[in-house]
Image (cartoon, rainbow, N blue to C red):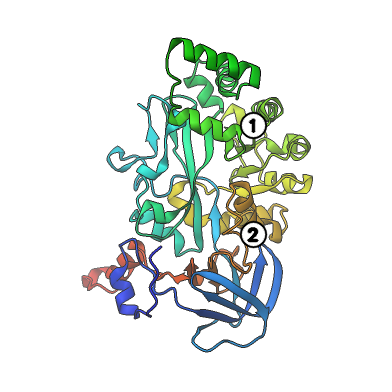
Amino acid sequence: MKMMKSLIGAAAAIALSGTALTAVSAEDIAITGGTAYTNGGKGKVENATILMSDGKIVSVASGGDVPSGYRTVDASGKWVTTGFMAASGSIGLGEVGSWADNSDASAAKAKDGIALDVKYGLNPRNTRVEITRIEGVTHALSHFSSAKDQWVGTGAVVRLAGDTPGEMIIKNQAMIYLDADEGSARSNGGSRSVLWPAIIKKLKDAKPKDEAEKEDKEGDDKKDKKPKEKSVAEKNLAALFAGDTSLVVYAHRVTDIEQAIALKEMFGFKVIVMGAREAWMVADKLAAASIPVVLNPHDNLPSRFDMLASTGANAARLNAAGVKIAFSPVDTSNTRLLPQAAGNAVAMGLPWEAAVDAMTVNPAEIFGVSGTYGTMATGKDADVVVWNGDPLELMTSPDAVFIAGEQIPLVSRQTKLRDRYLNIPRAPGLN
């Protein structure tokens, strides 16, 4: 990300809004006087002094002095957290879902879904980016929504700032997406009896050969032709078996979730279950297999037969069983509402601390970016939000948002439209 050392005034910041680079500064900043949560929903520090320099967290301490040269942001009486992360969605890949011309989230004609890479479709100037980040959601997992078959490409962990896809992406190919719900079974063979054997065969074919098999294969290659260069899809599957990425299985019905658990037992790679309306029914099995779950806290009623056991208590029950959970938004357009969805999970029994964990430290660990994001630890990226109250309450909003140490103007296309039409002259009859 391009760092700007000089302080840009508010007018200039507003002028920049609508472009990818909307940051005010990445100067040395001290946030003082607030109540900070340094480790997800834990690590509470009263009267905190948070020092940020060159885009990184320098220190977090109760009280303490502000070094010379730091700009001070007064957070007295306010709450301070790590910027939240939505652990699913297609942010940056399209503006309006039903308008195909601007959507790169679906690839119905792709020859090989496993090779799909979001970096080619990611748009830093997508209006959803600024609408989302000014609500305190600073990071997201961005992935495809559909493809030709059950293999729906790879996904990237992105920060919602930057001038180029490369500047947005923290970790590319953080997962391989496998659609294994009822709809996928209908579209890929007409039955789960076709879908799951096809999935297992694909993975068995991609499983690394043992040394004897490898020597035989190399011998055959020498006899017949030169060794083939691996395709992108083959490289992605090799990364899965090497432990460098994870398989995200999108499924709701408990039997499909049990198939996902079986995949991990069969092949040994990292598995994440997403969607997971009926996951609470096998919470103990998921915990024993160390399989995290990404779920939407708003999902409390079934809309299909593969999610009859939907309940708003899903997150609380999984957390109580020891399953690591992260939250997805209701849909990509409403990613900004993630903190309020988390508040619903708290209302249904999830501890507040665990709800904040599910939007910070947990997704960072699940998708392999905890080295730079997820907590307010020394040396990590300065992704920090100052809230005017409890961030999970409906009427709370951010007073300041920092992404990698750069303060983001709280301006979006929506706020501009609000301001434009707020005080327009009206006909007397409308007053």
Image: 296 above or below 403: above
Q: CA distance from mark 2 to mark 1?
A: 28 Å
Q: Nearer the viewer, residue 422 or 169?
A: 169
Q: Position of residue 141 (x, y in %)?
A: 51, 48
The residue depicted at 54 percent of the width and 55 percent of the height is 85
Screen quadrant of the C terminus: bottom left
Q: Is residue 152 visible?
A: yes
Residue, disc 1: 308
Q: Nearer the viewer, residue 48 or 338?
A: 48
Q: Nearer the viewer, residue 103 or 66?
A: 66
Q: Which disc number belongs to residue 356?
A: 2
> Dot 2 lies on which element?
helix
Which picture quadrant has residue 241?
top right
Q: Position of residue 180 (x, y in %)?
A: 56, 27
The residue depicted at 45 percent of the width and 37 percent of the height is 145
Circle 2 or circle 1, nearest the eye: 2
Pointers 2 and 1 in contact (CB under 8 A)? no
The amino acid type found where label 1 is placed reads Leu
Q: On the rendered structure, is 422 left or right of 201?
A: left
Which picture quadrant has residue 31?
bottom right
Image: 65 above or below 242: below
> Dot 1 lies on which element?
loop
- Crowd class of label 2 (few under 14; some 14 to 19; many from 20; radius 10 Å): many
